[in-house]
Amino acid sequence: MTYRTLPPFGGDARQVAEVVNGAMSGKTNNTGEIALSNGTITTLTDERIGYGSAIIFTPLTVNAAAFMGSMYVSARNKGSAVITHPSNALSDRKFSYVVVG
């Protein structure tokens, strides 16, 4: 879901109030979903990722929850990150994520 943003040179008072109120209510454009691959690395492609971004994961399935302690972000680049994790044939390792920074 995408939430309202402002034009590059600002907006009128109502537009600014809607965007600020939305952000204060947690309605930000920095979330997504990913499923881990069956190998040992999965590339997360998201234009909002940068070299210094923090990426926070929330498991959406029981199998994803089992991987939380054994996966990590091993590289961050402009527009992508590499997630390193154990190999497993389970197909439902789905996560939601938040990109900060």
Image (cartoon, grey):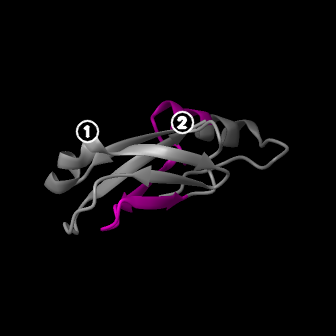
- The residue at the far left in this view is 62
Mark number, residue 69: 1
Quadrant location of the C terminus?
top right
Task: Residue at 60%, 51% (x, y): give it.
Answer: 4
Which of these two is toward me, 14 or 34? 34
Q: Is residue 53 above or below residue 36?
A: above
Q: Position of residue 68 (x, y in %)?
A: 26, 43
Q: Position of residue 96 (x, y in %)?
A: 36, 51
Task: Residue at 60%, 33% (x, y): give it.
Answer: 20
* Residue 49 as seen in the image, left or right of residue 64: right
Q: Is residue 37 above or below residue 73?
A: below
**Could you give the CA–CA distance between mark 1 and mark 2, rounded to whole angstroms?**
30 Å
Q: Position of residue 54 (x, y in %)?
A: 52, 36
Mark number, residue 10: none
Q: Is residue 76 above or below residue 89?
A: above
Which of these two is toward me, 23 or 85? 85
Question: What residue is pinned by disc 2?
Answer: 23
Q: Residues within 10 Å of mark 1 (few under 14, many from 20)?
A: few
Q: Residues within 10 Å of mark 2 (few under 14, many from 20)?
A: some
* Residue 16 as seen in the image, left or right of residue 54: right
Q: Secondary structure at mark 2?
A: helix
29 magenta-colored: yes
What range is drawn magenta here?
20-45
Task: Residue at 19%, 66% (x, y): give it.
Answer: 90
Q: Secondary structure at mark 1?
A: helix
The amino acid beneath tag 2 is Ala
